[in-house]
Image (cartoon, coloured by chain):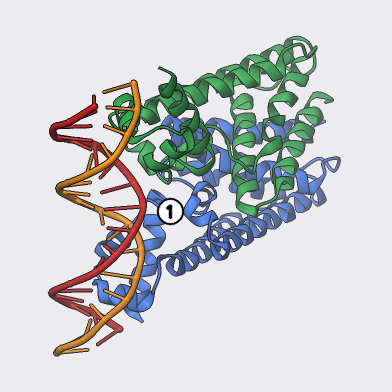
Chain colours: A blue, B green, C red, D orange
DNA sequence: GTCTATACCAAGATAGAC
DNA sequence: GTCTATCTTGGTATAGAC
């Protein structure tokens, strides 16, 4: 039970920062400090570990976005808090990198888990958009679902661009630009 | 000379749609229809092929965005044309996927080529933003660089989300939301 | 549940002939 | 420039003992 947790926690970090297909079971074992026998006892195949990791990383990310929004007075501030998710972009998004991993997409179970994580995140952002419109901090003229989709895409894209350029500033510029657009549309 | 071109063209498609680290030299040879001897004659190592592919895919993408913008009367329409780059998102961005590939990021040459491609794309979008402000189709109050960064991120993020959910509609929603934000800020 | 030993195949080349 | 044969390493397990 304990080793199983150690394996999952190591895999979550390694698959997140280094990718699923480009991280071997051996690297996970080494990082977790468990032997081969233990590893394959808990996870007979790599995809089984991957499924657990995608699910947990998705839940962790959702929880951390919720936590960063909690207690903020207006919907727009909660949206700004979500945009700040890309404040440390060089390590990559906890789930975004899986969307470009052939090993993930080839496995129906993993694909499914990944899609669920993104759908749930989109719903959370859409709720915040609606709240922002209700409390007057965002223009009621905006369509909530596409607006939420755009904000989610900005954050995911900010990770991509920051990693591609190697510069965190690339992500910061993107989220700052998105925030300015939200503000400009609200003061109309 | 001819086989070299065949190899590059196959690799460009395969690395684009299936990823760099998850595509083997053998798959490239098979797709290009060239033998092992020919392959390794032209590209002694996989990273050398990768560098050429990242450069060419970056240039191709830049050229296709420029082409899609050409002839459009207003800056905002040219920005809309750029947003339409994600109209076929399930295959992935021609360069965006490289940002999450450990094999690309580990090679300084490849990293460099990737960063250059993104920087050039950001500059192209920023020009279009400035033109849109000059011709009155976009609010002059927006800061051009962050606005361009946000739009680039929306497109990259649209690819990520569409692939994660397996639904093109996820990308369409994101770009539609971004376009609506541009319009809302301009009519202020 | 965990260990060590073993197995098998694919990735990424290298060698030398043509 | 291209071919076939060969080689090494690592990825991904399986087997059987403890």
- Res. B75 image quadrant: top right
User: Quarter of the image containing the C terminus of chain B?
Assistant: top right
How many neighbours does mark 1 have within 10 angstroms: few (below 14), some (14-19), or many (20 or more)? many
User: x and y percent of residue A59 in the render?
Assistant: 55, 64
- Dividing the image into 4 quarters, which one contains the N terminus of chain B? top left
Q: Is A176 rendered above or below residue A21?
A: above
Q: Where in the figure is residue A24, as x and y percent of width and height?
A: 33, 58
Judged left or right of residue B73, residue B85 is: left
Q: Position of residue A27 (x, y in %)?
A: 28, 59
Chain of the residue that carries numbered disc 1 in the rendered image: A
**Which residue is at a point 80% across and 28% down the rendered structure image?**
B183
Name the side, left or right, on which B112 lies relative to B65: left
Determine which residue is flagged by label 1.
Answer: A16
Residue at left offset 76%, top offset 44%: A146
Tell me if residue B1 comes above or below residue B111 in the rendering.
above
Residue at 39% across, 73% down: A43
Q: Is residue A40 visible?
A: yes
Is residue A188 or residue A89 the one in the foreground?
Answer: A89
């Amino acid at each position: 039970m304990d080793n199983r947790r150690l394996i999952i926690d190591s895999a979550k970090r390694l698959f997140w920062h280094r990718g699923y297909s480009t991280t071997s079971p051996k690297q996970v074992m080494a990082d977790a400090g468990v032997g081969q026998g233990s590893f394959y006892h808990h996870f007979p195949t790599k995809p089984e570990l991957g499924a657990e990791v995608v699910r947990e990383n998705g839940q962790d990310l959702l929880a951390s976005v919720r936590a960063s929004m909690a207690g903020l007075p207006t919907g727009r501030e909660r949206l700004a808090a979500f945009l700040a998710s890309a404040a440390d972009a060089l390590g990559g998004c906890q789930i975004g990198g899986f969307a470009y991993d052939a090993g993930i997409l080839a496995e129906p179970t993993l694909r499914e888990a990944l899609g669920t994580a993104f759908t749930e995140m989109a719903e959370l952002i859409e709720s915040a958009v609606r709240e922002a419109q209700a409390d007057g901090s965002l223009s009621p003229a905006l369509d909530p679902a596409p607006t939420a989709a755009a904000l989610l895409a900005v954050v995911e894209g900010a990770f991509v661009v920051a990693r591609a350029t190697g510069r965190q500033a690339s992500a910061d510029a993107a989220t700052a630009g998105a925030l300015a657009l939200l503000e400009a549309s609200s003061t109309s």
